[in-house]
Amino acid sequence: MSSTTAPLPQTGLQEAHLERASAVRRWLTPSLCDLFLLAVIGWSFMTAGTGWSRLLWDGDTAIHIAIGDWILDHGKIPVTDPFSFTQPNAPWIPYEWGSGVLFAKLNHAFGLKGIVFLCGVMIAVLITVLLRTMLSAGADTLLSVLMALLASNALLLHYHARPHLFTLLFLALSAWIFTEDRRHRTNWIWILPAITALWANLHPGFVILFAYLGVLVMGSVLEGSPGAAIRYAWLALACGLATLLNPFGLGLHLDILSYLRSSGTTELIQEFQAPTFRTQPQLYYLGFLLLGLTVSGLHVQRKSFVEPLLLLGTAYASLTSVRHSTIFVVLAAPIVAAELSAHWRTWIDRQPRNSAGRVLGQLSLEKRPAFSRSSPWVVAGLAAIFVWTPAALWPTDFDHKLFPVQLAARHPELATARVFASDQWADYLLYKNHPRQKVFYDDRNFYGEKMYQAVNGLMNGARGWPATLHQYQTTHVLTPTGSPLSDRLRESAAWKLVDHDETAELFARR
């Protein structure tokens, strides 16, 4: 005669163990969010017509590498200008010293490949964070994917290997945390002071965080939530104190404030000009701008004030300076996506059960969990891209069609000459001929309005250009082929053409 033993009921401890095991399995399983991040990298930098080299179309990358090299060479952060012969030893605060050191170390270890890979990953993470923020705001899954990709097209304007990427990424992370916190309080907001301390040593754009916090405090008061206002006010104080953890202390803040007040200087810098809406990224930005203004009105009708204050404030800033358009898109995209999703769901609810709209709505619900988590497999995917991408696809130098790469290589004497070149080309020379190179001026923002006006006159071959070059004992001029200054130099008996190619012309004083 056989007997059987009845199974014992699972204890609470066993259930907790099974739940942890299930969570670990989910965490170790690749997600659609991982695939989305890798797809953004592939689409942005590994398809025909894009490439990793596009991240080096701006000479700022070069000057930041040169700054990092100087710091690593000397073991200290400079407080006076080490790069120009026009303003030797002038007081200067390198805001982005941390970015410079990071770029220089990557360049030493991997060449330009290391820098563009880091910046490409930051861009992909930025777009993925925007997607996750949209989902946190309650947006439809498929619509969030679409809006994140449209936001990427709008942000394409500033897809450069420059420290401003840290500001865009940290701002997106902050917006994600604030979105979660406003729906249900989370302790994640207290990680922001640590992020802010790092941010303040990488890029001066950390000041936008305090504008955001100010909006949260004011909006919470208007919405009748004094507890939330106090919470964000304390957070602002903690983040403010964290920004003092930089080599310059309060001097960093005073110098940034002085720069922002110098309208005469910013008016001469192209990226501080108002948008023209003539390029594809600016047209995508225009779409977000129009949607953002519409959404602001809808929120005001519902007595919700944080979103309108945020959208209207950044919209104004973006219309006065094209560089702020990216800030607007980062903050507006999740708000717009959430609003559109509400209207989309209302429309879906009216559709027949087997309609395409209902099918899409159900698909969005099913795929939402897979887009709402990440796994370690994304790191493996990034490592595979870095290791196995063919060497021919990685840049070894800046684009010779945009920078005087070939001409500078043929004339090593430029490293010890007193050279005038555009700010972008001067950046390249400082990077290429470090540490010997000195330049007339470069892309840093400390030269002042008088110098910017003098350089603008030189580049246009305006009256008095010979006196400006003579004043600073300039021995060589490196100018784009066929530029107004090139025409003036060819006509002058004091200068001779030394070399030229399709990109640049080099003149030397007779």
Image: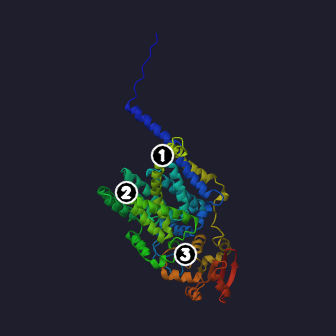
Quarter of the C terminus within the rendering: bottom right
Q: Nearer the viewer, mark 3 or mark 2?
A: 2
Mark 2 surroundings within 10 Å by alpha-carbon count, few (fewer than 14), some (14 through 19), many (20 or more):
few
Name the residue: 48% across, 80% down.
449
Residue where numbered disc 2 is placed: 302
Image quadrant in which you'd find residue 437: bottom right
Q: Position of residue 163 (x, y in %)?
A: 51, 65
Mark 2 or mark 3, which is nearer the start of the sequence? 2
Q: Is residue 75 above or below residue 46?
A: below
Please tell me whether mark 3 sits on a helix, a strand or a loop. loop
Q: Which mark is residue 350?
A: 1
Mark 1 surroundings within 10 Å by alpha-carbon count, few (fewer than 14), some (14 through 19), many (20 or more):
few
Image quadrant in which you'd find residue 58: bottom right
Q: Amino acid at mark 2?
A: Arg
Name the residue: 44% across, 57% down.
335
Q: Is residue 4 above or below residue 203?
A: above
User: Can residue 76 be seen from the camera position used here?
Assistant: no
Name the residue: 59% across, 58% down.
44
Q: Amino acid at mark 3?
A: Asp
